[in-house]
Image (spheres, rainbow, N blue to C red):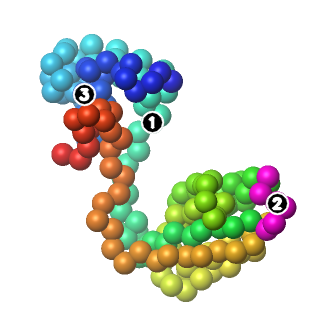
Amino acid sequence: MPPRDQLKDIDARILAVLQRDGRKPYADVGAEVGISGPSAYDRIKKLEARGVIRGYAAQVDPVALGFGILAFTWITQAPGTTATDLTGDFARIPEIEECHHVAGDADYLLKIRALDTRDLERVLHAVQATRHVFTTETDVVFSTAFERRPVRHDRETGEGGPA
């Protein structure tokens, strides 16, 4: 993928539009950024082919589905096992929404959605039973100010941030 500074201004504006509404028709995307619908289509297809646009998905409200608990769990691997990749083990636990291999005191950071505290306890037992997990530390979220912000494409002006 090319560096961010090689992204053409029109493509950056298209990305901003699609991050707000990934289902917007090509003609409407084009009109919003000042090009024709077919030109918008061509540019979007090129962004997809380059891997800049990885896909489209519905943003689902976890609370509306009953997942009232959000927690972040820091994982430290057992001494001598840090070369072992645990991402596949964590991927098998469906309540883990995100898994990040991190630098610092911990080795992984997991984002977990659970129905309630009892369900979170069950999930944490599954995490703790994972091979090579040495310690866990979990932070439960009280409230979320924002998440899933659009990816910024212009560091100087902040374009592409939330509208």
Q: Where is residue 148 in the image (x, y as percent from the top left)?
A: 36, 52
Q: Are marks 2 and 3 in contact (CB under 8 Å)?
A: no
Identify the image quadrant of the C terminus. Answer: top left
Q: Where is residue 57 in the image (x, y as percent from the top left)?
A: 41, 44
Image quadrant where residue 119 sits: bottom right
Judge left or right: residue 119 versus residue 58: right
Quick one: label 1, few (<14), some, or many (20+) residues within 10 Å?
A: few
Image point 41% across, 39% down: which residue? 56
Q: Are marks 1 and 2 in contact (CB under 8 Å)?
A: no
Q: Where is 143 relative to 50, above or below?
A: below
Residue numbers of the magenta segment = 78-83
Q: Where is 34 relative to 130, above or below?
A: above
Mark 1 belongs to which amino acid?
Gly
Image quadrant where residue 88 sits: bottom right
Front disc: 1 or 3: 3
Residue located beneath label 3 in the image? 13
Q: Residue extending furthest right? A: 80
Identify the disc placed on residue 81: 2
Q: Where is 24 relative to 35, above or below?
A: below
Residue located beneath label 1 in the image? 55
Could you tell me which secondary element the residue under label 1 belongs to? loop
